[in-house]
Image: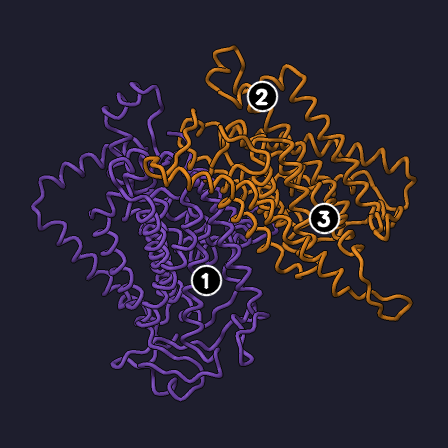
Amino acid sequence: METTTISPTPLPTAPVRSLAAVRRYVSQWALIAALAALPVYYGVHDLVYGYQVSVAGHPVIHHDLSNLGYDFAQGLSNGAIWALIAIGYTLVYGIIELINFAHGDVFMIGSFTAVGLWGVFGLSPGMSAAALTGALLLTLIITMIVTGSLNVLIERVAYRPLRSAPKLAALITAVGFSFILQNVGLLWRGGSPQSVPDLIGVQQTVFTISGVPIQRGYILVFAVMIPLVLALSWFINATRAGRAMRATAQDPEAARLMGINVNATISLTFLLGGMLAGAAGLVYALYETNVWYFQGFKAGLFAFTAAVMGGIGNVRGAVLGGLIIGVIQALADSRMGPQWTEAVVFAYLIVIMVLRPRGLLGEETREAG
Amino acid sequence: MSAFLDALRERGGAMAQRLPRWWSRALAGAFIVFGIVLPFLFPPDSGFINGTIVAVAYAVMSLGLNIVVGFAGLLDLGYVAFYAIGAYSLGWFGSGFFFKLHIHVLVSPVASTLPGVHINIVLILIGAAILCGLAGMLIGLPTLRLRSDYIAIVTLAFGEIIATLAVNGQSIPIGGGMTLTAGNLGISAVDAPYFPGTGSFTLLDLRPWYWLIFAILLLVLFVNLRLRDSRLGRAWIALREDEVAAVSMGIPLVKTKLLAYSVGAAFGGMAGAFFGTYYTEVNASQFAFGFSIFILAMVIIGGLGSIWGAVAGGLTLGYINNYLIPDVLNDLPSKFGLHFQLTQVEFGIFGLLLVIMMLLRPQGLIPERRRRLELTAKIAAEDAQLEEAPATILPPGEGSA
């Protein structure tokens, strides 16, 4: 399982070495420059040319950054959802070096489970705040258990038998499972996006910061994401099982020799990743007020891009990457039109791969491309 | 079951050694004759010929992807991009889509009076292959330094970008009121293939279409077989098996990898251009991610790196997709009281096939000789014991070396 970094560069002679130094320098700053390009461009554009808003029916040109601030608020809360999914990718990749392709679809199943449970519990927007909160918490817990177990099951059926086989094999079964789950979703709720009741009034403005309205949905997303991420960090850093996870990620063979049950630890990792995906699924359904069997495909790719951007194998990196991808997505959505968003995000993915495959916070040793 | 098959194959192999050398040529000749005669056994517009045409075109694509994934071991999840580029080269150069231009090269008398660009199908096929070859190099460049699973994601991203461009191409003006693509409306009224002796092909008589795609299949098969046994083919396999060792033996990594992408893409482009004219339209909705997986499933089910496996996988899944699922088994769920049709979940079925294949028979239907030896020969097992590493079934990724 030892990872060897393969460099196609020929024997290091003097000019090649200086080239490599240039390359390192470029890779350090080019990605940051590329990431800053979109917000800086649109910020300057807003300040110089202004943007049109309608005040009491009259078009007015504003020259400020509120519009950009709105994109950022929207983007960060989208990004918090991507971050929750990205953590699942990053944990699994960190421990068995597999891109769990089915992860986005586990997230989709999470959304569907949550929406199904709303129906079972009879949740409606008219309920009292306390009852609604309690019921949503219960839904959250059940959804997390369902998706966590589903993820463990997938690992057991599709990845564990292939653990000693080359990586390509497990990646292919992952793709296969992604399609199976998508079709399960298709049979469950039909082929077109379904709107679900807006339980908490996500678009109501709670307060305004210098012209940027902060909606309920934003607060909801962070209220779920932050405690979960903190709990996960605590679990990984402070518990015995978390230490076993870190040890297995570093060297499965040595971990086994030290008496760690590697299989159980890997299952635990899938459980945690699946639970976070389930939470993301619930939040997504509340936040977007619609669910679709195909939502997991886009979400999975965005989240994977986020995980790679942050440095795959790194939980903090996944959160950072998720938030950045969310902002890129929001900027592309509002400035270029949503039909271009996927292309923009994927173009960023390719740029990251070229410039800095280990991501923003990734460590060079294990995760270097 | 599998042990029985292996025993059978071993005996078959022994028999093949006893047979005279002309045997394989006779077999190839019989295959070609059978392929040519086949459509005479069915009515000229029968559903079976239609299914066969599509299945053979899939086999061509599968052969192309097999070069990238099977020979060179680079997992490509964006193969649909080359279908799209191939189909669009037909849409652009074989229809009235660029209505401001009047370019006609060796086309039917009717087409040469119409506005737009109308070029003979053979030239378009060559053009599509070149265009896709260049696009393949383009996608190859950023993946050169990456590990296998990262390659998969970058190629996927590339495929999705091309698909997004195809869908949104309607809003990309290229001058003169013309746009890059027609998006989900589709470029329709594309030219049917025309040869001086035959006139334009029509959908009432499918036989000429079949012979055209069969000829493409033979060409691609020939190129594949010659490539596999060439210096380049051995270089691909060497890179797949151990990149460090291959590079230190003097194999040019950049050139070899880029050629794999490029040749594989060129075949996909030819099949794509054929699909463009056969479906009589080029519609952006055809270029979904699922198609990449569909072609990948053909390669895997046939046997990674195996040429005849890729053909068998392409034909099998082609028939399953265009004949078995829609025509024969579609009502199966309703017989069990379930309210859906099997065509709705075809990608789920292919996903399941992928999982089952990987778990039960990772070497595929017709495994490559080298792989089969690795799996069966004692030497491989002993080697594996020496290194305390499990026997390899598939090309090891760079990282798991």
Residue occupied by mark 3 = A75
| Quarter occupied by the C terminus of chain B | top left
Whole-number angstrom distance, CA of label 3 to CA of label 2: 31 Å
Q: Are marks 3 and 1 in contact (CB under 8 Å)?
A: no
Q: Classify residue B203 as left or right of residue B241.
A: right
Is label 3 on the same chain as label 2?
A: yes
Q: Amino acid at mark 3?
A: Gly
Q: Classify residue B39 as left or right of residue A19.
A: left
Helix, strand or loop at mark 2: helix
Q: Classify residue A325 as left or right of residue A178.
A: right
Helix, strand or loop at mark 3: helix
**What chain does mark 3 sit on?**
A
Residue occupied by mark 1 = B84
Disc 1 crowd rating (10 Å Cα; few below 14, some 14-19, many 20+) is many
Helix, strand or loop at mark 1: helix
Is label 1 on the same chain as label 2?
A: no
Judge whether B339 appears above or below A143 on screen. Answer: below
Residue occupied by mark 2 = A245
Q: Colour of chain B?
A: purple
**What chain does mark 1 sit on?**
B
Judge whether B45 appears above or below B288 on screen. Answer: below
Is label 3 on the same chain as label 1?
A: no
